[in-house]
Amino acid sequence: MDSLKLSFVISLSALLSLVCCSYPASAGDIVHHDALAPKKRGCDNDFILVKVQTWVNGEEDAEFVGVGARFGTVIVSKEKNANQTRLTLSDPRDCCEPPKNKLVGDVIMVDRGGCKFTAKANNAEGAGASAILIINNQKELYKMVCEPDETDLDIHIPAVMLPQDAGVTLEKMLLTNDSVSVQLYSPKRPIVDIAEVFLWLMAVGTILCASYWSAWSAREAATEQDKLLKDAAEGIPNQRSELNSVVDISTTTAVLFVVVASCFLVLLYKLMSYWFIELLVVLFCIGGVEGLQTCLVALLSRWFRRAGESFIKVPILGAVSYLTLAVSPLCITFAVVWAVYRNTPYAWIGQDILGIALILTVLQIVHVPNLKVGTVLLSCAFLYDIFWVFVSKKLFHESVMIVVARGDKSGEDGIPMLLKIPRLFDPWGGYSIIGFGDILLPGLLVAFAIRFRLSPLSLFL
């Protein structure tokens, strides 16, 4: 690998490590800590996510996700037990006074504000509603609790909070269609998330493969160097060949990681937008192509040794093997196809392949030279993770790491620097995800341990 390629891969690996060093949150944001409003009689429900399925003029339409209130009746968990009920818009809209129209078992939709949540629910129940949907005035979900001075609550209809955008959509449905009905239910998540198990196996397997590959390459490089020294009658300069080009992390670099990572993360947080996500996609594709190419060349060179050892000079890139030229078009095509179709349901497969190949290549090039550096690096990463996931909420009013990882301000599904697997057996769907930093950083230490264990020096310990 020439110096240009080596520098690019190292720079890109630093970018990937800084971007995602934590698990992004799932299932949307739910705000409001209710420590000052403890459970009481009539207000002791657990907060649960609720699916609100809609039908427009008898045909199934959009589905929304809300959160159940602390008060009211418990929402059924099975879809087959949920009733399809007509949706009605409240008059007055905030339902702080009894609705003017009588509701015969309808689900009533009301706006948040003007009075207590429990007052809205009591008014809706008194008018004959079978459930109440309260539309938040913000995009987040909000935990609806009872006031500390409220006692003897006796609400017998379910209450659900929906985000602002869901309310806008539902109101348009009601104003432009003859009939809109909804179905409320809260399916339970499985006890064991199979996707999490496979994600763990994928991450651990990637680290082990990269570590043993790194150890094997280090031993091969040492053997090659010894052979050159023995065969040289007058001695040779003490330098590594292209195959052995690696970069050792120093203690200073490990400490600077926190500062540089924090600055870069804040930059991403402030500049996060659609075009910025597109730029990250391009960088990810370039790194994925390089990683996939390196892995394929290393694998195929065992069978096509002559093609792997024959080189041709290419402008800018320098000497490139014929085997690299053969696999490069395939790698580029693969990355381009993924970029074009990255929003399709099965695009996660291509993203994981490119990501794993890139991680393998980075762990092959970047090395932790000793246990001291590894300890400093992981300690700094540990503090970095805690600060930007949890402490940053006090400074920015939201978790900076989670916002960046999910791409909340970009209008996209999130940054591509992560591995993900769909939750196939989870009724709530979504993906189980892990950032590249969560694999790369511990992988550096594991790779060092395996290299040391398989080195000749360990035989004397």
Image (tube, grey):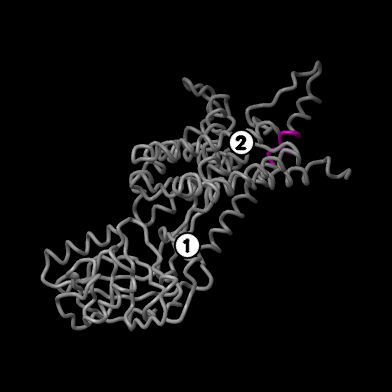
> Picture coordinates of residue 363 (x, y %)?
62, 41
The residue under the point 69% across, 45% down is: 445
Q: Nearer the viewer, residue 157 or 324?
A: 157
Which range of residues does the magenta coloring cover? 216-223
> Picture coordinates of residue 60 (x, y %)?
22, 71
Q: Is residue 6 above or below residue 455?
A: above
* Residue 353 shows in this picture: no
As measured in the structure, the alpha-carbon distance from the residue carrying label 2 to the one carrying label 1 is 34 Å
Q: In terms of secondary structure, where does tag 1 sit?
A: loop
Label number found at residue 67: none
> Picture coordinates of residue 22 (x, y %)?
54, 50
* Residue 457 shows in this picture: yes
Type of amino acid under label 2: Phe
Q: Which residue is mark 1?
A: 33
Q: Is 217 one of the magenta-colored residues?
A: yes
Q: In the rendered view of the protein, which quadrant contains the N terminus?
A: top right
Q: Which residue is mark 2?
A: 257
Type of amino acid under label 1: His
Q: Residues within 10 Å of mark 1 (few under 14, many from 20)?
A: few
> Picture coordinates of residue 335 (x, y %)?
41, 42
- Residue 452 lies in what quarter of the image? top right
